[in-house]
Image (spheres, rainbow, N blue to C red):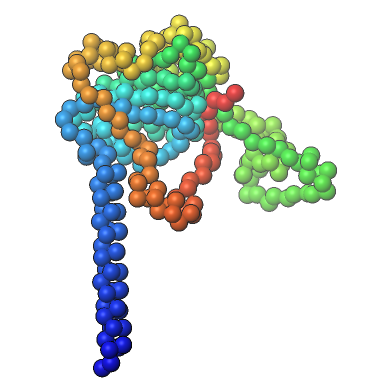
């Protein structure tokens, strides 16, 4: 065998060894990042108060609900402070998070701290708490339900476009942008909205200790400042997290000075995942929000 052949074999062997160690190094980094970034509840030590943030549009979310169930079952968590900064979202999303927080409240005290906006479904979320705090300038209320659609038949006619729908019944797929809104469709849709509105009003009456008629009078869709909400008994007091801690200690016997720790119900992307996304430059991890169905949402 020639010297050149020996050199080529040695180089190939060296390349294979280098490739092996590179792969091993990458795996080690990924595992390390997983350990650092994937702590969650399991990484917590000792008793503490959980701080949970509910922000943005509220939708049905099984991952969020799973974290809330884990909070309810975790004996290390002695109380929960829920910071809410949300204009609401879907009716189903609001119902789901309300139910999950009520399950927690059966095991340990829950306080809601309203931020800049906690309206509509955001206020529904707060109703699950044992005690509600707001800032004087918080925008809250907007108690109600909405179902929106568009009707573009006149525009289509001007464009010379005619649509036809063959249905099994007149109310199938109605209301539709491609059909004029008939009195029957309006009546049925309004009845659906009214039904869910009655659910929301009943929540307010039950959780805020007021009669149905009083709750209904407050639920005309308007928003309230924190001060106005306090005067109408929609919240219990003005304040923030400090006031929440004082109430937990005084009213529910939570140990003074207990640590408050963040528990993410919408975890940030793990470092390795975010790094890969940036390197690859693709949008495979991106999400797009769409709201369907009945909505309990405030927007100016």
Residue 224 seen: yes
Q: What x and y, as percent, mark residue 44?
A: 21, 35
Q: Pick out the residue farthest to the front.
A: 3
Is 99 located above or below residue 226 in the figure? below
Q: Nearest the camera: 65 or 214?
A: 65
Q: Is residue 128 left or right of residue 278?
A: left
Q: Residue furthest bottom?
A: 1
Instruction: Give the quadrant of the C terminus.
Output: top right
Where is residue 119? Give x, y as percent.
Answer: 49, 22
Q: Residue at x 47, y 27 (%)?
A: 86
Q: Position of residue 63 (x, y in %)?
A: 36, 42
Q: Is residue 10 above or below residue 205?
A: below
Residue shown at the point (29%, 64%) measured from the top left = 22
245 and 184: which is toward the camera: 245
Q: Nearer the viewer, residue 9 or 145?
A: 9
From the viewer's perspective, is 63 left or right of 73? right
Assign the N terminus to one quadrant of the image. bottom left
Kindly identify the residue that appears in the image at 63 percent across and 49 percent down.
Answer: 168
* Residue at the left extreme of this rendering: 46
Q: Is residue 157 above or below residue 12?
A: above
Q: Can residue 191 be seen in the rendering of this structure? A: no
- Which residue is most to the top? 231
* Quadrant in the picture for residue 69: top left
- Front residue of 287/219: it is 287
Q: Quadrant of residue 223?
A: top right
Q: Residue visible at 34% across and 46% down?
A: 270
């Amino acid at each position: 065998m020639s010297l050149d052949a020996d050199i080529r074999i040695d180089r190939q062997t060296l390349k294979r060894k280098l490739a092996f160690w590179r792969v091993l190094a990458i795996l080690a980094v990924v595992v390390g990042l997983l350990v650092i970034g994937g702590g969650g509840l399991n990484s917590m030590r000792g008793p503490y108060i959980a701080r949970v943030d509910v922000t943005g549009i509220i939708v049905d979310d099984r991952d969020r609900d799973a974290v809330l169930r884990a909070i309810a079952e975790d004996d290390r968590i002695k109380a929960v402070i829920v910071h809410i900064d949300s204009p609401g979202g879907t009716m189903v999303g609001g119902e789901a998070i309300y139910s999950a927080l009520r399950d927690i409240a059966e095991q340990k005290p829950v306080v809601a701290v309203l931020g800049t906006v906690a309206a509509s479904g955001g206020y529904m979320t707060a109703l699950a708490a044992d005690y509600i705090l707001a800032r004087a300038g918080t925008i809250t209320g907007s108690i109600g339900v909405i179902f929106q659609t568009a009707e573009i038949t006149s525009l289509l006619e001007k464009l010379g476009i005619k649509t036809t729908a063959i249905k099994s019944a007149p109310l199938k797929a109605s209301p539709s942008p491609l059909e004029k809104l008939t009195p029957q469709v309006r009546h049925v849709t309004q009845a659906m909205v009214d039904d869910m509105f009655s659910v929301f009003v009943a929540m307010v009456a039950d959780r805020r200790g007021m009669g149905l008629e009083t709750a209904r009078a407050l639920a005309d869709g308007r928003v309230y400042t924190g001060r106005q909400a306090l005067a109408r008994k929609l919240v219990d007091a003005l304040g923030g997290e400090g006031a929440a801690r004082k109430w937990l200690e005084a009213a529910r016997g939570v140990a003074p000075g207990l640590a408050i720790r963040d528990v993410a119900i919408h975890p940030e992307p793990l470092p390795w995942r975010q790094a890969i996304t940036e390197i690859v430059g693709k949008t495979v991890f991106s999400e797009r929000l769409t709201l369907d169905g009945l909505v309990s949402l405030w927007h100016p």
